[in-house]
Image (tube, rainbow, N blue to C red):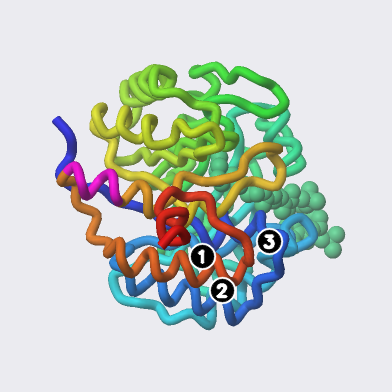
C-alpha cells in the first residue's frame, strides 16, 4: 500500500544555508540553485525573506531570487515571516510563499518574537495578499513533535495551529520535526490525527535527522499514504533558533530509499550527488548524509 510517486521538496538553499557558518556568496548560491534545477527536482526552497539581522546568511534573498535561472516546471519558494518579507518576496517574484510558525509557544517566541496568538494576525494578511498576487502559499508548523524549550507538544496544539492556517487559505501545510526528536510511533499518532481533519495531499512532512530517525519516520508516513517530503541535499541544515536542529533529512538518502522501493521522484541521484559534492566544497565541511560519506570514501 505504498504510493507509486512521491514529491520531494528541496529545502537546502534555505534550511541548509540559513545555518552555515562559512560564508556562501550570492554567486555560489545562484550556482547551487541552478544545479539543483537540473537534477529533476520540481521544487526548491531557495531563500528566506526574514529579517537579515536574524539570518544574515540569507540577507541577499532578493538578489538570489532575481538572478537564478527559472527552469520551467520547477517551483521556486521562499520563507516569508510577515508583510515586510512578502514585499521583498513579491519584488523578487517568488513562485510560492512559505509562511511559518511553531506549535509550541516558546519556540515561536524565540524564532519570530511573538506568541502564537499574536502570530495569526501577522500571517493572515500575508496569505491574503500572496493569494491575490497569484502565489500559492505553504505553511510550516514547527516543533510539531517536540520543542527544545517546552518539551512535549500536544497533538491538539498541532491540530489547532494547522486549522487556523488552513482557515487563512494556505494550500499546503508542512509538519516540522524541527529538532529531530520524532519517532515512528509518534508520527503515526500525529498523522492519524491530522488526517481526520485534512486531506493527505495538503500535508507535507519536514523531518530533521538529528537522532537518526528521519527515514524511519518517512516510511511510517508513506505507509499512511503521505506523499510530500521536505529534505536537504547532503543533510545540510537546521534552525538557528532551535539548539540541536542540525541536519535535515538528506535528499540523497531519501531518494535512494524511495527509488529502491519503486517509488518514483523524477530526480536523478547521480546529478544530485555531484551537486552535493559541489556545495560541500563551498561550505567547506563534510556533509552528514550517508551518500556523501560514501562519495568521500570513494
Ligand atoms: P521583529 O524584530 O519582532 O520585527 O522580528 P518587527 O516586525 O518588530 O520589525 C522590526 C524592524 O525589522 C522594522 O524595521 C521592520 O521593517 C524590519 P524598522 O522599522 O525598525 O526600521 N523587518 C524586516 N526587514 C526585512 N525583512 C523582514 C522584516 N520584518 C521586519 N521580513 C521577525 C520579527 C519575524 C522579522 C524576526 O523574528 C525574524 O526574521 N525571524 C526569523 C527567524 C528565522 O528565520 N528562523 C529560521 C527559520 S524557521 C525554521 O527553520 C523551521 C522550518 O525549517 C521548519 C522546521 O524545521 O520545523 C521552517
Ligand atoms: Mg527545518
Q: Is residue 211 above or below residue 60?
A: above
Q: Position of residue 193 (x, y in %)?
A: 37, 19
- C-alpha distance separating marks 3 and 2: 23 Å
Q: Position of residue 266 (x, y in %)?
A: 23, 60
Whether residue 131 can be seen here: no
Majority secondary structure of magenta residues:
helix
On residue 29, which mark appears? 2
On residue 148, which mark appears? none
Marked residue nearer the N-terminal end (3 or 2)? 2
- Magenta-span inclusion, residue 89: no
Q: Is residue 278 left or right of residue 266?
A: right
- Asked whether the residues under the numbered discs 3 and 1 touch, taking CB atoms below 8 Å apart as contact, a structural biologist would say no
On residue 46, which mark appears? 1
- Position of the N terminus, as image quadrant, is top left
Q: Is residue 171 above or below residue 79?
A: above
Marked residue nearer the N-terminal end (1 or 2)? 2
Q: Residue at x 48, y 34 (%)?
A: 212
The secondary structure type at the circle numbered 1 is strand
Whereabouts is ligand 2, in terms of quadrant? top right
Q: Is residue 189 left or right of residue 50?
A: left
Depth check, front residue: 182 or 48: 182
- The mark closer to the camera, 3 or 1, is 1
Q: Is residue 141 above or below residue 9?
A: above
- Asked whether the residues under the numbered discs 1 and 2 touch, taking CB atoms below 8 Å apart as contact, a structural biologist would say yes
Task: Indicate if the residue with disc 2 has its beta carbon within 8 Å of ligand 1.
Answer: no
The secondary structure type at the circle numbered 2 is helix
- The mark closer to the camera, 1 or 2, is 2
Task: Indicate if the residue with disc 3 has its beta carbon within 8 Å of ligand 1.
Answer: yes
Q: Which residues are magenta?
A: 256-261
Q: Residue at x 37, y 30 (%)?
A: 216
Depth check, front residue: 123 or 13: 13
Amino acid at each position: 500500500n505504498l504510493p507509486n510517486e512521491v514529491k520531494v521538496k528541496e529545502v537546502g538553499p534555505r534550511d541548509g544555508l540559513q545555518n552555515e557558518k562559512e560564508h556562501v556568496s550570492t554567486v555560489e548560491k545562484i550556482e547551487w540553485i541552478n544545479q539543483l534545477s537540473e537534477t529533476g527536482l520540481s521544487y526548491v526552497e531557495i531563500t528566506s525573506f526574514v529579517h537579515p539581522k536574524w539570518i544574515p546568511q540569507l540577507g541577499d534573498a532578493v538578489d538570489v531570487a532575481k538572478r537564478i535561472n527559472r527552469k520551467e516546471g520547477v517551483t521556486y519558494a521562499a520563507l516569508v515571516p510577515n508583510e515586510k518579507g512578502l514585499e521583498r518576496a513579491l519584488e523578487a517574484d517568488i513562485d510560492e510563499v512559505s509562511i511559518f510558525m511553531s506549535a509550541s509557544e516558546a519556540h515561536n517566541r524565540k524564532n519570530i518574537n511573538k506568541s502564537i496568538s499574536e502570530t495569526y494576525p501577522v500571517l493572515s494578511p500575508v496569505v491574503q495578499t500572496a493569494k491575490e498576487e497569484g502565489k500559492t502559499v505553504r505553511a510550516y508548523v514547527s516543533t510539531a513533535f517536540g520543542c527544545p524549550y517546552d518539551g512535549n507538544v500536544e497533538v491538539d496544539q498541532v491540530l489547532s495551529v494547522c486549522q487556523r492556517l488552513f482557515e487563512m487559505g494556505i494550500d499546503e501545510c508542512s509538519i516540522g520535526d524541527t529538532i529531530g526528536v520524532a519517532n515512528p510511533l509518534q508520527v503515526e499518532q500525529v498523522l492519524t490525527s491530522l488526517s481526520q481533519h485534512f486531506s493527505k495531499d495538503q500535508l507535507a512532512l519536514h523531518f530533521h535527522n538529528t537522532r537518526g530517525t528521519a527515514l524511519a519516520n518517512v516510511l511510517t508516513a508513506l505507509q499512511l499514504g503521505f506523499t510530500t517530503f521536505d529534505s536537504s541535499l547532503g543533510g545540510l541544515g537546521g534552525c538557528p533558533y532551535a539548539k540541536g536542529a542540525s541536519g535535515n533529512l538528506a535528499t540523497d538518502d531519501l531518494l535512494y530509499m524511495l527509488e529502491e522501493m519503486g517509488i518514483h521522484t523524477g530526480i536523478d541521484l547521480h546529478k544530485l550527488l555531484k551537486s552535493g559534492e559541489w556545495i560541500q566544497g563551498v561550505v567547506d565541511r563534510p556533509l552528514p548524509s550517508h551518500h556523501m560519506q560514501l562519495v568521500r570514501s570513494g
